[in-house]
Image: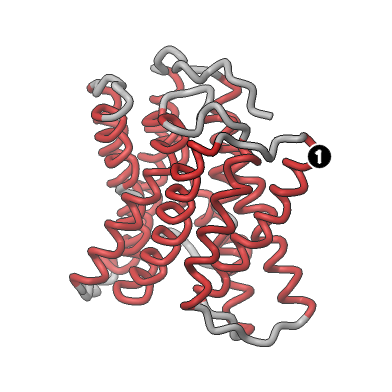
Amino acid sequence: MNTQGFLFVLAAAFMWGLIGVFTNYILPEGISALEIAFWRATFAWVLFVIHAGVKKQIKVQRTDLPALFGFGFICVTLFYGSYQLAIRDVGMALAAVLLYTAPAWVALMSWLVLNEQMTRTKIICVIATIIGVACISLGPQLMNGNSLELDWFGIAAGLVAGFTYALYYIFGKKFLYRYPTPTIFVYALPFGAAMLFPFVNFAPKSAYVWMLLIGLGAVTSYGAFSAYYAGLKRMEATQASVVATFEPVVAAIFAFILFGETFSILGYVGSSMIIAAVLFVVFTGARPSRATTEDTE
């Protein structure tokens, strides 16, 4: 496996793991989840425009605009919207499990669309990460004997979230690998945010909230996606999706440090499974893909 690619994706997972930290500070200020998603996309777009302008990386071929806009609609509008609906209807824990079915979707689509081999190693790692995320997210309820309230619309929304999240990998490898990361998001983010706009109820915000929203966009979108796509250009999509599942481990660690939330026994088991799967991917990495040598800047 390409070491640089691994470190980039790991850095992205770390930054994505901070989404819950920002959200836990913003929600009590009266800002809705969909408004948070809207501003996250908007402020990240501003930073990508600045980056692309400085690097002179704004131009794209007209024939690629449909793919870029499709990326924005599917991976911003649908992903953000479906995940918020899943959280609303089935709760954060089960929504997180459904979201992290993404490695399975990636493995399947990488096999069908990208012609990546469906190896036994990949299958084992995908299964381990999904079970690991389930242990982390649902461990407290299961250990306390609480029953899970199942809502089929919410479950469907969560599966859509996992599927659209997985498409970040497929779009990046199949259609957008020849463009630098800033160029992709200069077009995708505003289109995705525009599709969210009609569903947002905007609330008054203090300077403190504005700073948190800017930080959310800068770290978890601009920083995370810059690092992630730099990594994706150096490694296989399935490998990247497994490494990215380190995100819930990071989130759980910060939840413990900042909010006093602790793991259940199953949470520690799940964390160990995810870490083991990531290490397994590292030490059994496949050859770089065709985009490995592409410049990420």
Q: Amino acid at mark 1?
A: Val
Q: Quadrant of residue 183?
A: top right
Measured as percent of width and height from the top left, residue 60 is found at 60, 36
Q: Is residue 13 left or right of residue 175?
A: right
The answer to which image quadrant residue 267 occupies is: bottom left
Measuring from the top left, give residue 113's x and y in whole percent.
29, 29
The colouring scheme, among rainbow, by chain, secondary structure or one colour, is secondary structure
Q: Is residue 60 left or right of residue 285?
A: right
Residue 147: tell me if it is visible.
no
- The secondary element bearing badge 1 is classed as helix
Residue 117 screen position, x and y as percent: 27, 19
Number of numbered discs visible in the structure rendering: 1
Q: Is residue 173 left or right of residue 210?
A: left
> Which residue in the protein does label 1 denote?
54
Q: Residue at x 73, y 51 (%)?
A: 47
Is 90 rendered above or below residue 116?
Answer: below
Q: Is residue 178 visible?
A: yes
Q: Quadrant of the C terminus?
A: top right
Residue extending farthest front? 62
Q: Nearer the viewer, residue 12 or 281?
A: 12
Label 1: few (<14), some or many (≥20) within 10 Å?
few
Using the image as rendered, state which of residue 159 and residue 133 is in the foreground: 159
**Residue 145 to residue 28: above or below:** above
Image point 28% across, 46% down: which residue?
131
Residue ID at (68%, 60%): 43
In which image quadrant can residue 144 be found? bottom left
Instruction: Between residue 215 and residue 128, name the one nearer to us.
Output: 215
The location of residue 44, given as percent across then percent down, is 66, 55
Query: Residue at point 53% right, 26% down?
Result: 233
